[in-house]
Amino acid sequence: MGNCIICGASVDGHICSSHEEDVVFTFEGNRANQLKPGRYYEGSVDGFAEFGVFVDIGTSVTGLLHRSELDRRLDSLDWDAGDSVYVQVTDIRDNGNVDLGWSIRQRESDFRGKLVQTPEGDEMPDEPDEEAAEPVAAGGNAAAKQKVRTPDADDAAPATTESDTTEEASSEGEAEGSDETAEAVDESEATDVADDEPSAAAETDDTEEHSELARSTVDSVTDLVGQVVRIEGEIISVRQTSGPTVFEVRDETGVVEVAAFEEAGVRAYPDVEVDDVVRLEGEVERHHDEVQIETEVLSTLEDEDAATVADRMDAALDEQADPGSVDLLADHDAVAAVADEIRDVATEIRRAVIQGRPVVVRHTATADGYVAGAAIERAVLPLVAAEHERQDAQYHFCERRPLDDTVYGMDAATDDVTNMLDARERHGEQLPLVLLVDLGSTLESREGYELLDVYGAECLVVDSGYPDETVVDDLDGIVDPHLAGDDVTDVTTSALAANVAAHVNDEVRDDLAHLPAVSYWQDTPEAYTDLASEAGFAEDDTDELREAVGLEAFYQSYKDKRELITDILFEEADGLAGHVSEQFRTKLDRELQTARRNLSTRSADGVEFAILDADAFSNRFDFPPTELLLDALHRSEATETDDDLVTLGLDEDELHVRSTSPIDVRTVGDEVAAQVDGGGVSVVGGRDGHVEFLAGERDAVLNAAVAEIANSFA
């Protein structure tokens, strides 16, 4: 019989069954069936495959850590071949294959003990790692820990213990050849130590309890590895691992991870929550180039103490979030009209990143939407990486979610609220900043961001469409040139978003220079063609990029396709944009030929109408979508006439309008609704949106729309 190295219980061996998962094992066997499922083992990376990582356990057995077992993307792992890693054996198959599970504990000190598993049984290591094996005090109680703060160089020397004094006295007695002298010295010194001198342990406890560490800042801890530091800041996330509880703490200079251990999988400091202002002390450690503090003391601050820290952080936040003076990418009147709004929205995005709030970018699944969303993403990702030690932070704190719709309705808002509440409950994340790009500025989106507002999630809009001014006050910020009072027709959302992104992160400004030109299907402002040319993109290049993104926006439209879009827009992957844009033209040209052959025309009050029955003469569920096909058809038809031309596209229950002169679709829809009583007529997307109706009233809706549009030209 022996004693459990964790709890001391009597066991047949070295570890009890309830603490086996708290120990990491070194495997010295030579067959897979000698491994024990459920145990954690030290291994080394053998190689990578598309489906996972091969890990050597010992010298004779290799297992597979499948990518489905990871808590992050496979390509976000910072492992290299030969790196030491920690994995759990989950299954040993009959054919000898070993299935491995992910371990959030990726350093020996995260475990509470270490053992060696040999073919004969479990053994203690020859030279146990005291730091990894020592028990950690429940709840982070520093006084109960065996690991103590190292005294400064000018601290008093540790008191001599009784055993040390005895040995010294005995040695002196032997040297002098007198047993009586040795005995006298022994008794005298021992009595002095017992009565007058504190023991070394007592002095250490006193130091732990009464010493006052000077406050350190997060930006300095990288240079303090191995030292105990004191940090004051705000909890921005809490996540429970199978080992320690990991808090992310932000102060006025940055964010750091703080690990606290109660017992495996048990929440440490359960009363500490997101947004709490705290003071902590702990030792700075480094693992795989990530800095983490192993906490010894963590307490919540209140009243004046909390206010002092909060004020300090707020002052620093205001300074850090301010992007400075506005410097637009190019001289463009429509964008210059909203320069102040660009700065305000950029400030709020920067503030969210610094505070550790996720940034969720919602955009339309169009070329303009994807380019605009990618511009914001390009600016935010480096800032997220700089703020967080976690190497997968870019996937947690910046998400781009395309939306196959032109408004931010209840469906999208419910999805976002569900995700943010789940992230708060499971991972202790703060509520996100939601940025609506190329949508969100009309009445049809109001119910969406009102749902966000119920939970206090901030919502911003960047949109080139005509907004409904009655909803502007419901938003936390909006960039839309139409609010400046001009009838703007030469601006895209990408042109606005690229300028916002340049002020979110000035270091990516050069990466964004070609994006405004990419977003124009025709009549690109000369300022943007020149800007793209200076960045090395000729007109043919921006055409290819636009068409490539337009095609990829259609397929898997609900996915961000982060890496693919990055390759197309920024990495200039060899031949990628040209290959995809060629497919775009082939598919679009085929549909255009069919549409032209089946286009009907009519005149009303001198206005020419070209009408496409998209239900009958287009492939609705293949590329291109009706809106893109109608855009291309209208451009080609408009070049053949000098008169006003209106192109109408009819899906089963939708009417889309394109015109050579501006048309207020909301007004048209309201008039059609009055004329077609009971037709279920409504407008989606405001002035430049589309009309929806009941399919059975299709002809009546078309006739009423033609009459109303013709009347608007009179």
Image (cartoon, rainbow, N blue to C red):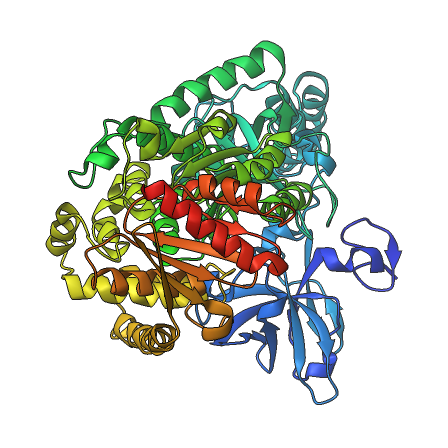
Residue at position x 31%, y 61% in the image: 634
The residue lying furthest to the front in this view is 605
In this view of the protein, can residue 514 be seen by the observer? yes
Which of 24/319 is in front?
A: 319
Residue at position x 23%, y 64% in the image: 543
Picture quadrant of residue 87: bottom right
- Residue 648, compared with residue 65, is above or below; it is above
Q: Position of residue 335 (x, y in %)?
A: 25, 36
384 sits left or right of 533 in the view: right
Residue at position x 32%, y 38% in the image: 500
Q: Position of residue 472 (x, y in %)?
A: 46, 28
- Residue 425, compared with residue 545, is above or below; it is above
Residue at position x 72%, y 30% in the image: 271
In this view of the protein, can residue 245 be seen by the observer? no
Picture quadrant of residue 192: top right
The residue lying furthest to the bottom in this view is 95
229 sits left or right of 500 in the view: right
Which quadrant holds the C terminus? top left
- Residue 395, compared with residue 339, is above or below; it is below
Q: Position of residue 304 (x, y in %)?
A: 57, 9
Which of 252/57 is in front?
A: 252
Which of 309/459 is in front?
A: 459
Which quadrant holds the N terminus? bottom right
Number of marks in the rendered image: 0
Picture quadrant of residue 52: bottom right
Q: Position of residue 178 (x, y in %)?
A: 65, 34
